[in-house]
Amino acid sequence: MVAHQMVQSGDLLVPHIYGELYLRKPPLQYWIVAATEWAAGRGNEFIWRLPSAVGSAMLAVFLAWWAGRWFGGRARLVTGFSCLALVALWAQDRGGDIDALNTFCCIVAACCILEIAVGPTRRPWAWCIALTLSIGATLLLKGPAALPTILGALLGSALLVAGRRPRLVGALHLHDLFRARVV
């Protein structure tokens, strides 16, 4: 309803509901749903739920591509179908809630961290840009509640890299983390 009322009122920047300012949640979900409604020219349940379904489809495609990049073609196929078979994601799509797009952005951020830290990348700058965009989108979708997945990937990557270089116990050096590679 918030996104629908944004389109109806023409105020696409600040979310309102029933004429009252609504700042309980970060605005990106509302902006995406409002943009979808505006592009479709009408608002209904299908249009309002479409961004969540597209977000889950993008998650399956991204994870399949990423798994194939790391582990080969069979892993790509298994990962893609496994992601599509997750019943928990179906509930996110059906309800059109904020979690489907947030899940996509969090997973992209976590994969970017893993790719930068221990992956087979030749272009870490591109992964850093993707990481920045996905963390920004995650914060604009869910706020700080989305950070545990990203922080877990950061900590896990730091632990993977920790045995390769001498460092202070418990210290997390981002510079070393982003420069590390698996040989």
Image: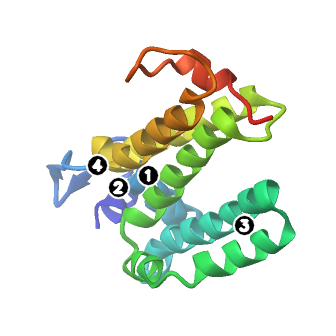
- x%, y% of residue 60? 64, 70
Q: In this view, does 125 lie to the left or right of 113?
A: right
Residue 12 visible (yes or no): no
Q: What SS does tag 2 mark?
A: helix
Question: Counting other residues with Cα less than 10 Å from the Cα at mark 4, is it few (<14), some (14-19), or many (20 or more)?
Answer: many
Are the residues at dot 1 and dot 2 in contact (C-beta closer than 8 Å)?
A: yes
**Residue at mark 2:** 6
Q: Is residue 35 left or right of residue 44?
A: right
Residue 48 visible (yes or no): yes
The tag on residue 31 is: 1
Q: What residue lies at 73% left-to-right and 31% top-to-bottom?
A: 181
- Whether residue 1 is situated above or below residue 171 in the rendered picture: below
For marks 4 and 2 on the same chain, the one whose residue lies earlier in the sequence: 2
For marks 3 and 2 on the same chain, the one whose residue lies earlier in the sequence: 2
Are the residues at dot 4 and dot 2 in contact (C-beta closer than 8 Å)?
A: yes
Amino acid type of the residue that numbered disc 4 sits on in the rendered structure: Pro
**Residue at mark 4:** 15
- x%, y% of residue 83? 59, 75
Amino acid type of the residue that numbered disc 1 sits on in the rendered structure: Trp
Q: What residue lies at 41% left-to-right and 79% top-to-bottom?
A: 88
The tag on residue 64 is: 3
